[in-house]
Amino acid sequence: MGMYQHIRALYTNPQENLGGLWQQRLIKMRREPTILALERPTRLDRARALGYKAKQGFLIVRVRVKRGGRKRELIKGGRKTRQMRRRKILSMNYQWVAEGRAQRYHSNLEVLNSYWLAKDGLYHWYEVIMVDPHRPEIKSDAHINWICTTKHRNRVFRGKTSAAKKSRGLRHTGKGAEKS
């Protein structure tokens, strides 16, 4: 097995495979700010698979999202009993929320993709791959320079990232879905 396969195997069950290192990382991540720019990705295999390159113009941002609390408050006014039930307020998954927060924090960059990093009883952590579309290194790279055009501006807010498409039900290719 190569290096990337070993990293992928560790993260199939990180709590058992990483042991004490996993606990240390969680303790450290809980104390850090909610949105933190990193020098290098924690999961190199996943970042590379999603388009990350170790060159100028790419940035990894770790985002912490609080779990739970995604429903409306209980209605206390007068309603028909049929209308009194709680309704889900947020139809976005946690990963899409994390991408949006990273985009608002780094408004000059564009979200390329993101991946799950960790979770505990209170938080989810995601690492978001961001690209600077104004860097000459990005503009000259044939694989990523599509993100430099203006039609890809703020793609996370328009539901164009992979996590957003999954949340919107657009990645389903099973029975009944049109295959292209």
Image (cartoon, rainbow, N blue to C red):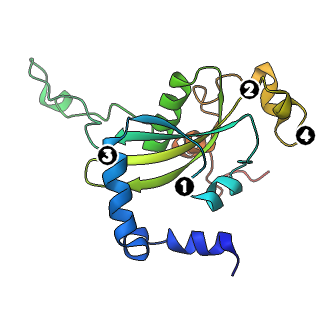
Mark 1 or mark 4: whose residue is earlier in sequence: 1
Q: Which mark is residue 152?
A: 2
Q: Return the residue at label 1.
A: 42
Mark 3 or mark 2: whose residue is earlier in sequence: 3
Q: Give 3 or 170, whichever is nearer the viewer.
A: 3
Q: Please, what is the three-letter code of the amino acid marked with disc 1?
A: Thr
Mark 2 or mark 4: whose residue is earlier in sequence: 4
Mark 3 or mark 1: whose residue is earlier in sequence: 3
Secondary structure of the residue carrying numbered label 1: loop
Residue contact at pointers 1 and 2, CB within 8 angstroms: no
How dense is the environment of label 2, judged by Cα within 10 Å: few (below 14), some, or many (20 and up)? Answer: some
Q: How far apart are the alpha carbons under marks 3 and 1?
A: 15 Å
Q: Please, what is the three-letter code of the amino acid marked with disc 2?
A: His
- In front of the other: label 3 or label 2? 3
Q: Please, what is the three-letter code of the amino acid marked with disc 3?
A: Arg
How dense is the environment of label 1, judged by Cα within 10 Å: few (below 14), some, or many (20 and up)? Answer: some
- In front of the other: label 1 or label 2? 1
Q: How far apart are the alpha carbons under marks 1 and 2?
A: 27 Å
